[in-house]
Image: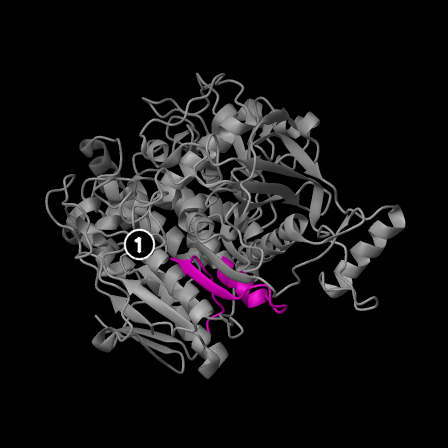
């Protein structure tokens, strides 16, 4: 296929090539009624009409694969591996190209282990081909990008949709891979998790940001981010901002006066419970990809580009990880029209309508709890983890904070004491209280494999950040609400005091560096009811803002109607409608516990689909949620990269779809930790990474009538 020429300026693709208002209306009506199928009245192809959910123009950019590209933004394997982020000529005013490069760099590195001893450049990376060989050099991939918003015209949704079409795409053997963003990341959020594999395979990659999109609104300046990451004032942005707070200028000014230097974030403060639309957003990304492929490869009649690919014509794998994986499962469940061919997801964050027939056992013994929604287990973990970290069974945990040991121990001890005073834990001393807190986490479904992860999950603020963001989202809270006295703002680096004006505003580069869920890019999680005023939640009170954590927990346990309605709106039924599917998850996952995600989903799917089920679960020993942490001392010796098995699962699914090879059955994969000295673990090797077995034997996970039994 002819290589794409470098094209520097953004182009705007027309909403339809049909001429005249009547033709546009007729084409839109046809697409709405027939889903883009051929025009049955004439027997010929229909015009390639932009889906009705796309709002505004579609911007395109073509990359030559040398100076810039789809996968590495011109950085190549070497640049992505560099500890130094790509530079910006004018830091106060980055260009859209610089922001894209920074976003790809940051998001790529956020989801995979980038250390050489951990496998980057050897088992995965731009240079590694689909057979696992180092043959691709710097791994740059030429091609074309399409980007647009999905919205109803109001500008309140503005879900970013992006399609990458590599120059290697074969129009006669078309394929699409979705890469729905994980976490609350921007549109490139799953580029290393699913985008890289799809691009190497020659598939179009359909990205979307799930309506989270790292959208930030700086209240002090009224600056917001646009779809390309550049900034505008709320008045100039109009309906084109990724997000702006839904409040009057006067109310925001009053709030900023009372709470200086605060930020509204889209996932937390859109007041739309965006998670309820994640499946729909993923399906929209696929439909947008169909339109883009028809725009490139559809036949031309006169001045009209026509449809070459109708729904179901393109092999499409819904793929991603974490809540991007959950979005893929939701999309597959909602897909009644045949857009999705198969599903491959890692560590999916998913909330179930749990059938009564489902049970989960490990080694024949019932697990402590299973199938709880995220808000339940996360608010409990946020409450108990600082204390549980002091239990003897959790000793030697990897240290994932810049705080001094004395500071973290003081926080943990104080949290234990406050929990005991309020009846959440029992015990006459700190060790007894911490042991009870850890036992409660076990009873709540957390694996003993995760015991040494409770400290780093809380210390890194992953769990507190998720708790606050999701509670805000489920409560449909405005930034003005300061729900449970939490907000997002800049703080003093030494004292933690909130309200400080940042020396360098995070806004110019937040599209490139932010993850959409503070703390990020210098914006921290603030507790406003601190002992001496608002401060970083870890320092606001001696017990690390216990009252705020207890408040969030109570919103769920007391059955707040808004909370309950929002959680019920996001629950899924595990009916994949006969689609072949693979779920990969690490047993030690302490952010999305496997007992609340993959295991009960497997059982619920068997209840929903019975003998028609084509779902396999591959549970990875010594695997946890954050592969990017594997370069940290203590993570390197204990845990292995789940991403390695995500790639293997995608290859297995491809072989199944193209060669009818059977998918290996559900199983435990006994990956082996690297061991050695923390911070200097030996290089990862295939000895650590046994393959997913065609015949797992005693390692098989069995499912009978919804009852899941996992071998020890």
Residue 394 horizontal side relative to residue 377, left or right: left
- Residue at 44% x, 32% y is 74
- Residue toward you, 194 or 679: 194
- Residue at 79% x, 60% y is 30
Q: Residue 106, image x and y in percent? A: 41, 35
Name, please, the residue furthest toward the front.
Answer: 2
Q: How is the image coloured?
A: one colour
Instruction: State yes or no: residue 340 in magenta.
Output: yes
- Number of marks in picture: 1
Q: Residue 567, image x and y in percent? A: 52, 59
Instruction: State yes or no: residue 194 in magenta.
Output: no
User: In the rendered image, is residue 91 in sight?
Assistant: yes
Name which quarter of the figure residue 425 lies in.
bottom left
**Dot 1 corresponds to which residue?**
644
Residue 119 horizontal side relative to residue 157, left or right: left
Quadrant where the C terminus is found in the figure: bottom left
- Residue toward you, 702 or 292: 292
Residue 705 in the image: above or below residue 343: below
User: In the rendered image, is residue 528 in sight?
Assistant: no
- Residue toward you, 53 or 277: 53
Q: Residue 517, image x and y in percent? A: 46, 40
Q: Residue 2, image x and y in percent? A: 55, 43
Name which quarter of the figure residue 461 lies in.
top left
- Residue toward you, 15 or 128: 128
Residue 610 in the image: above or below residue 395: below
Name, please, the residue furthest toward the left.
Answer: 676
Residue 301 in the image: above or below residue 569: above
Disc 1 packing (10 Å; few <14; some 14–19; many ≥20)? some
Where does the magenta region start and end? 328-354
Element under disc 1: helix
- Residue at 77% x, 47% y is 16
């Amino acid at each position: 296929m002819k290589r794409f020429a470098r094209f520097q300026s953004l182009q705007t693709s027309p909403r339809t090539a049909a001429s005249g208002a009547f033709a546009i209306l007729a084409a839109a009506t046809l697409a709405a009624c027939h889903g883009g199928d051929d025009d049955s009245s004439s027997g010929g192809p229909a015009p390639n009409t932009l889906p009705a959910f796309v709002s505004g123009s579609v911007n395109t950019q073509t990359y030559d694969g040398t100076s810039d590209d789809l996968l590495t933004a011109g950085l190549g394997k070497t640049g992505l591996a560099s500890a130094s982020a790509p530079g910006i000529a004018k830091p106060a005013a980055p260009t859209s190209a610089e922001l894209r490069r920074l976003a790809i760099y940051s998001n790529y590195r956020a989801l995979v282990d980038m250390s050489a001893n951990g496998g980057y450049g050897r088992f995965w990376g731009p240079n590694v081909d689909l057979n696992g060989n180092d043959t691709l050099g710097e791994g740059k991939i030429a091609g074309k990008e399409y980007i647009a918003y999905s919205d109803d015209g109001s500008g309140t949704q503005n879900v970013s949709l992006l399609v990458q079409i590599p120059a290697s795409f074969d129009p006669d053997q078309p394929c699409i891979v979705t890469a729905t963003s994980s976490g609350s990341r921007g549109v490139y959020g799953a580029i290393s998790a699913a985008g890289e594999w799809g691009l190497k395979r020659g598939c179009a990659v359909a990205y979307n940001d799930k309506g989270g999109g790292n959208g930030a609104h700086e209240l002090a300046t009224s600056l917001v981010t646009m779809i390309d990451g550049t900034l505008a004032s709320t008045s100039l942005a109009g309906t084109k901002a990724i997000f702006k707070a839904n409040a009057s200028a006067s109310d925001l000014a009053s709030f900023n006066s009372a709470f200086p230097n605060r930020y509204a974030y889209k996932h937390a403060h859109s007041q739309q419970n965006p998670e309820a639309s994640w499946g729909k957003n993923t399906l929209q990304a696929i439909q947008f990809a169909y339109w883009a492929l028809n725009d490139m490869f559809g036949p031309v009649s006169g001045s009209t580009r026509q449809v070459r690919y109708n729904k179901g014509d393109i092999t499409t794998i819904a793929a991603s990880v974490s809540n991007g994986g959950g979005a893929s499962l939701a999309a597959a469940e909602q897909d009644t029209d045949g857009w999705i061919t198969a599903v491959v997801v890692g560590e999916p964050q998913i909330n179930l309508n749990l059938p009564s027939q489902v049970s989960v056992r490990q080694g024949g013994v019932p697990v402590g709890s299973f199938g709880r929604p995220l808000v339940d287990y996360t608010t409990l973990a946020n409450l108990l983890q600082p204390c549980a970290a002091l239990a003897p069974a959790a000793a030697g945990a990897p240290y994932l904070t810049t705080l001094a040991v004395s500071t973290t121990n003081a926080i943990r001890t104080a949290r234990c004491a406050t929990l005991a005073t309020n009846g959440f834990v029992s015990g006459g001393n700190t060790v007894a209280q911490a042991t009870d807190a850890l036992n409660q986490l076990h009873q709540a479904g957390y694996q003993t494999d995760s015991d040494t992860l409770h400290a780093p999950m809380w210390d890194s603020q992953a769990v507190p950040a998720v708790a606050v963001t999701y509670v805000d989202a489920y409560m449909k809270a405005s930034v003005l609400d300061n729900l449970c006295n939490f907000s997002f703002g800049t703080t003093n680096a030494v004292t933690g005091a909130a309200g400080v004006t940042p020396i360098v505003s995070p806004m110019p580069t937040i599209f490139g560096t932010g993850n959409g869920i503070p703390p990020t890019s210098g914006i921290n999680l603030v507790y406003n009811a601190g002992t001496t005023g608002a401060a970083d939640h870890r320092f606001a009170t001696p017990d690390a803002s216990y009252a705020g954590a207890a408040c969030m927990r109570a919103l769920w346990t007391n059955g707040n109607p808004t909370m309950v309605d929002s959680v019920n709106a996001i629950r899924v039924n595990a009916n994949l409608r006969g689609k072949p599917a693979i779920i990969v998850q690490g047993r030690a996952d302490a952010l999305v516990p496997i007992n609340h995600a993959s295991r009960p989903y497997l059982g619920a799917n068997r209840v929903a689909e019975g003998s028609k089920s084509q779902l396999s679960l591959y549970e990875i020993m010594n695997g946890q949620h954050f592969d990017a942490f594997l370069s940290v001392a203590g993570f390197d010796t204990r845990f292995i990269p789940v991403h390695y098995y995500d790639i293997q699962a995608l290859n297995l699914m491809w072989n199944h779809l193209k060669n009818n090879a059977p998918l290996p059955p559900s199983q435990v994969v006994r990956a082996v930790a690297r061991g050695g000295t923390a911070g200097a673990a030996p290089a990862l090797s295939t000895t650590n990474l046994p393959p997913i077995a065609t015949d797992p034997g005693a390692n098989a996970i069995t499912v009978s009538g919804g009852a899941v039994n996992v071998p020890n």
